[in-house]
Amino acid sequence: MWKWECSEQPKGVIVIVHGAGEHHGRYGWLRKKWQEAGFHIIMGDLPGQGKTRGKRGHIDSFNQYIETVYEWYKEAALYGLPIYLLGHSMGGLVSIRTLMEKKMDLHGVILSSPLLKLAEEPPKYKTMTSRALHRLLPTVTAPSGLKTHLVTRNAEIREAYMMDELRVTKVSLRWYQEIVKAMTLAKRNINKFPNVPLLLIQAGDDHIVDNEASRFWYDELKINEKWFKEWDGLYHELFNEPERDDVFQYAKLFAELHL
């Protein structure tokens, strides 16, 4: 876990949760933008990702993600300031499941292209094989199939990501089954999502997650205040797209309106 503090009088704290196969280091631009806007930042690498210890691309249980994010939240709470949770892609799924399982005093939640269904699901034979073998061979890995060349239209960021030594390209059988279970629970237990202001921003041209699944989940959500915006033509990583300044300003508006 790492912390960055803004230089001026702080307005609040943003806890950022990254997506699958990546790490907190890819969020440098977003971190600086929130700092400039007057927010402290807390984020880190999820288990099996980035610089964490243990087998890369593997978790024994999705609860490892939940407990990690909850620790980040408790660290943020020490500031005594309004707290926002921002989760991207798999980090969005982790944020949803953490909010369903843990009591967190938040001023708002921002979900960026959350993983509720894959844009292209693996062939049935691969799914069946994984389901059959993950208890016997949980740490066996296979290529994730993530189309990293389609995460953003920003060529510079895309090329840097393809060369990133911390990028995880293989995932374990257990990891995949835990993700599938988490997506199912996020939809099945939607009534457990707390009544906290929500902003869901979704890439309109998403090649990683199913944007219709995000919209369906959002429509089913019964909370007092929720915002949804789909960004036409933008790829999965909204905060890395050429239009990312516009995306950030929209997210910043949501956060400032709920201080």
Image: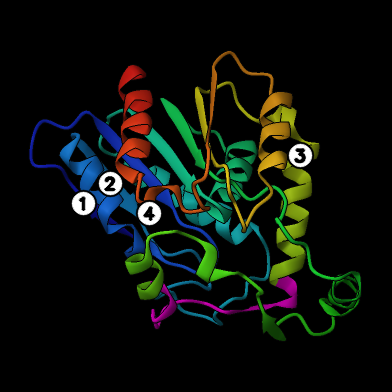
Q: Distance between the residues labelled 2 and 1?
A: 5 Å
Q: Quadrant of the C terminus?
A: top left
| Residue located at (16% from left, 40% from top) | 36
Q: Which of marks 3 and 4 is nearer the N terminus?
A: 3
Q: How far apart are marks 2 and 4 (CA)?
A: 18 Å
SS state under label 1: strand
Residue 202, x across and y down, in percent: 55, 40
| Residue located at (53% from left, 73% from top) | 48
Image disc number at residue 240:
4
Quarter residue 163 falls in = bottom left
Between 69 and 203, the one nearer to me in the picture: 203
Instruction: State which region is magenta.
Output: 161-174
Between 196 and 254, the one nearer to me in the picture: 254
Q: Does the magenta stretch include residue 126?
A: no
Write down the residue under mark 3.
187
- Crowding around mark 1 (Cα neighbors within 10 Å: few <14, some 14 to 19, many 20+) is some
Write down the residue under mark 1.
4
Write down the residue under mark 2.
41
* Mark 2 and mark 4 residues within 8 Å of each other at the beta carbon: no
- Disc 1 residue type (three-letter): Trp
- Crowding around mark 3 (Cα neighbors within 10 Å: few <14, some 14 to 19, many 20+) is many
